[in-house]
Image: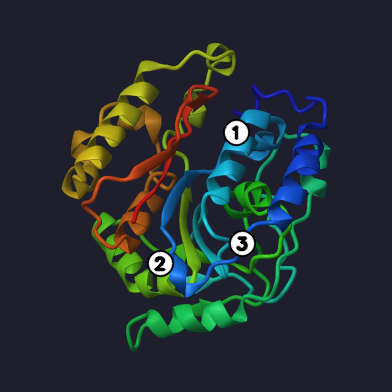
Amino acid sequence: MTSILNPRVPAGALDEFLVGAVPVARGRAAWTPSDGPMPPIYLSHGAPPLFDDGEWMRELFAWTGRLPKPTAVLIVSAHWESAPLSLSAPAASTPLVYDFGGFARRYYQLTYATPDASALARRVAALMPAGDPVHQHSSRGLDHGAWVPLKVMYPLGDVPVLQLSMPTHDPRKLLELGRRLRPLREEGVLIIGSGFMTHGLPFVTADMVRGKVPGWSQDFDDWVAAALARGDVDELADYAAKAPGLPYAHPTVEHFSPIFLTLGAAEDPEKAVETTISGYMMGLSKRSFQTA
């Protein structure tokens, strides 16, 4: 992917987006208990060039505009696989991790300062099983699977953000982890599983960059969409045996696995989800959704 993308794409789309988004964000209503539990979401987080894609930024921003502003965000990203379960630094202005290469210099100069998330860190730790402590990092920052989409979704940086590591790829264990986190929704916390619905970076071609969607990406995306529409969690959990195009759509599965944390945090994991973003970027599926 990084060998195909042109790091010299002119800057400006993000600045243009922020000019319109920031005033709107200031007027958003904060969550209150009368709003009910925040919906857990799965989002395809893209990559730094998301900031050059005006349409995708508008889709993400419009999505959060349909929700009350959360009290905090707890996000599990494909880019932090770590066991035992760990939390990012909760202090205000958590540093960013620029965990990508081959892009324009401006991406490495972006910042996203957020408020202190210590209260959320304590709540997360309290929800875990006795004898299974959560490791609290003092310096681990937010990786691009967290800060890139959040900078667009909440451009004011006024929502506390805490990142939780992904300790396993076992769907059942991730469903259970999501279930344990479910009470946070009733406190206005937005729980996010952050991945990419198809992520076959080694197989991205120049034709895909120009807009061609390969069969393996569309087949996998269609399979997921059908299973989500049926609420068929068992089908999704058996992706290794049943998903078409899997070796190409996910040569490694870390960008698919967060879907199970999102479903686990749902009130009913088998209820059909609401797709909020669909379509493709460089032939890769942007499918994102929320559930109740």
- How many discs mark residues in the rendered view? 3
Badge 3 vs badge 2, beta-carbon distance below 8 Å: no
Determine the image quadrant of residue 127. bottom left
Q: CA distance from mark 1 to mark 3?
A: 23 Å
Residue at point 23%, 50% (across, down): 271
| Residue 72 coordinates in the image, percent (x, y) | 57, 68
Way the structure is coloured? rainbow
Q: Looking at the picture, does residue 165 appear above or below residue 104?
A: below
Disc 3 crowd rating (10 Å Cα; few below 14, some 14-19, many 20+) is few
Residue at point 63%, 69% (across, down): 160
Determine the image quadrant of residue 159. bottom right
Q: Looking at the picture, does residue 91 appear above or below residue 221?
A: below
Kind of residue sitting beneath label 3 = Ala
Which label was assigned to residue 29?
Answer: 3
Please, what secondary structure does the residue beneath circle 1 have? helix
Disc 1 crowd rating (10 Å Cα; few below 14, some 14-19, many 20+) is many
Which circle, 3 or 2, is nearer the viewer?
A: 3
Q: CA distance from mark 3 to mark 2?
A: 15 Å
| Residue 100 coordinates in the image, percent (x, y) | 66, 43
Which label was assigned to residue 37?
Answer: 2
Please, what secondary structure does the residue beneath circle 3 have? loop
Kind of residue sitting beneath label 2 = Pro
Residue 134, visible in the rendered structure: no
Residue at point 61%, 44% (across, down): 61
| Residue 137 coordinates in the image, percent (x, y) | 60, 75
Among numbered discs 1 and 3, the one appearing first in the sequence: 3
- Residue 192 as seen in the image, left or right of residue 53: left
Kind of residue sitting beneath label 1 = Trp
